[in-house]
Image (cartoon, rainbow, N blue to C red):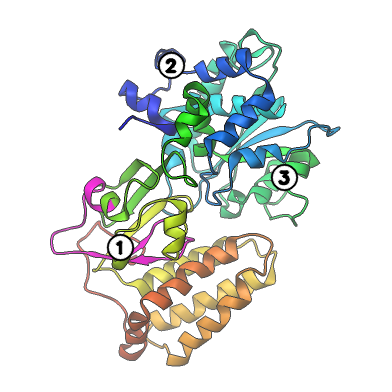
């Protein structure tokens, strides 16, 4: 199987590509040169469509369609914004791309800008990613000095530059409109949609916003062709996806797979090394902490958008958190509920109040003071929170708890009846969501 997608150059080179000369020797910037010298902007947009590339940040919306929504006759300038906020628990793929292969991201942003006619781009990076921000800043300076950014990119008539902007560490700024608010210097809170960012985004101008992995996948698509990329994976889930595997596995890390060609079992056992002797999978949040949880019965599910949806969850950001049978699903649900309660911006009442009450009820159960009616109370909350707010944070808060209560109801019942949901202790240093 060939080495693919957003980290393939670094893997082919066998070392980090943080120097521009190394990146160019590995074939870097050939995609941009091809776009600037042999293609029109509309042809580049069509290449995005033909590749079938879907957004890798969580929503999975086709990247080409999203880019085509930008109006061509708008009086205001267009912008490209890279969402590098990566705050979803369990997700760390974008961090590795920025740290080990920053020029591929920069090249991808530049190609996207050429396609939509943008002259300015922004990388909004998570505040905690200080090292990655330094790596990107150095890469931007090197690209600018070599003529890959600035006036006359690659000696063409195309002018484009990128500004690196550091956030302040708020989960809500991973939501695209909250990010745009923060980028404009305002408090990071979601906007009412419509209008969508493609029509009125940054500074009320047409804006294409995608995450790091999506934009970093563009250069190989332009270099090797959209049909090559579309031939990988399934009809509706083309290309590859990087899964950030963490939790109770023996070899946590980032693993890139062809969509649909690998099952959850193969990812956890063959790639990530499986679990400690005598342990088996209890629960897995395949797409990050905000998706419905899966159980051991789902191990043979193929890893693609449609198969995971049929199993009752989402591919999401592919932050795959695995918990073995030494963990406690009740405590894990409380930990997630506490996170989303803390990260709610408070703008929408159902989210602000609902996440608070979900946490309180779960905390009562974990403390040994739970009542059987608490389970029905939780069920009644879900429909009053999810789908009733401006952004997806409330949905992400509800999904893991609701699915855990559905799949592992006996664990919740036992926790209420016995007054203590804690399982046997784990060995030191192996804590995940269920312990802390």
Magenta-highlighted stretch: main secondary structure? Answer: loop
- Above or below — where is 373 with respect to 252? below
Q: Is residue 409 visible?
A: yes
Closer to the camera in the image, 194 or 174:
194
Left or right position of 208 against 226: right
x and y, in percent, of residue 6 in the image: 44, 33
**Mark 2, mark 1: which one is toward the viewer?**
2
Please tell me how many numbered marks the rendered image carries.
3
Quadrant of residue 140 within the rendered picture = top right
**Residue at coordinates 29% horizontally, 76% vertically from top-left?**
422
- Above or below — where is 406 with respect to 156? below
Q: Which residue is mark 1?
A: 323
**Residue at coordinates 41% horizontally, 88% vertically from top-left?**
369
Q: Which residue is mark 3?
A: 197
Closer to the camera in the image, 335 or 324:
324
Mark 2 surroundings within 10 Å by alpha-carbon count, few (fewer than 14), some (14 through 19), many (20 or more): few
Quadrant for the C terminus, please: bottom left
Mark 3 and mark 1: Cα distance apart in space: 37 Å
x and y, in percent, of residue 125 in the image: 56, 39
Closer to the camera in the image, 118 or 359:
118
Mark 3 and mark 2: Cα distance apart in space: 33 Å
Q: Which residues are magenta?
A: 268-295
Q: Which residue is mark 2?
A: 27
């Amino acid at each position: 199987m060939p080495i693919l997608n957003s980290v393939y150059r670094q893997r082919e080179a066998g070392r980090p590509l943080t120097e521009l000369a190394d990146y160019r020797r590995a074939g870097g910037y050939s995609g941009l040169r091809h776009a600037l010298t042999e293609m029109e902007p509309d042809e580049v947009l069509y290449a995005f469509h033909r590749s079938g590339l879907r957004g890798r940040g969580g929503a999975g919306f086709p990247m080409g369609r999203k880019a085509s929504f930008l109006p061509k006759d708008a009086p205001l300038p267009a912008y490209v914004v890279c969402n590098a906020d990566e705050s979803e628990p369990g997700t760390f793929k974008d961090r590795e791309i920025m740290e080990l292969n920053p020029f591929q991201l920069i090249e991808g942003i530049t190609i996207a800008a050429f396609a939509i006619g943008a002259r300015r781009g922004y990388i909004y990076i998570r505040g905690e990613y200080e090292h990655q921000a330094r790596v990107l800043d150095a890469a931007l300076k090197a690209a600018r000095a070599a003529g890959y950014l600035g006036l006359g990119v690659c000696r063409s008539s195309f002018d484009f530059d990128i500004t690196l902007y550091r956030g302040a560490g708020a989960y809500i700024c991973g939501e695209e409109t909250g990010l745009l608010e923060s980028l404009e210097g305002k408090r990071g809170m979601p906007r009412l949609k419509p209008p969508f960012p493609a029509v009125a985004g940054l500074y009320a101008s047409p804006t294409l916003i995608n995450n790091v992995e999506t934009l970093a996948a563009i250069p190989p698509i332009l270099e090797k062709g959209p049909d090559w990329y579309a031939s990988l994976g399934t009809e509706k889930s083309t290309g590859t996806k990087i899964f950030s595997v963490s939790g109770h596995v023996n070899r946590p890390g980032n693993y890139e797979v062809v969509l649909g060609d690998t099952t959850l079992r193969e990812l956890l056992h063959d790639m990530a090394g499986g679990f400690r002797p005598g342990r088996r999978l209890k629960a897995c949040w395949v797409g990050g902490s905000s998706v419905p949880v899966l159980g051991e019965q789902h191990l043979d599910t193929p890893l693609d958008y449609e198969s995971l949806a049929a199993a009752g969850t989402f591919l999401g950001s592919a932050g795959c958190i695995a918990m073995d049978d030494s963990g406690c699903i009740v405590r894990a649900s409380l930990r997630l509920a506490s996170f989303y309660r803390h990260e709610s911006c408070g703008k929408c009442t159902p989210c602000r109040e609902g996440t608070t009450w979900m946490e309180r009820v779960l905390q009562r159960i974990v403390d040994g003071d739970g009542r059987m009616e608490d389970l029905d109370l939780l069920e009644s909350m879900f429909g009053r929170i999810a789908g009733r707010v401006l952004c997806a944070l409330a949905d992400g808060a509800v999904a893991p708890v609701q699915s855990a209560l559905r799949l592992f109801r006996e664990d919740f019942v036992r926790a209420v009846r016995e007054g203590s949901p804690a399982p046997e202790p784990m060995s030191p240093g192996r804590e995940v969501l269920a312990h802390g």
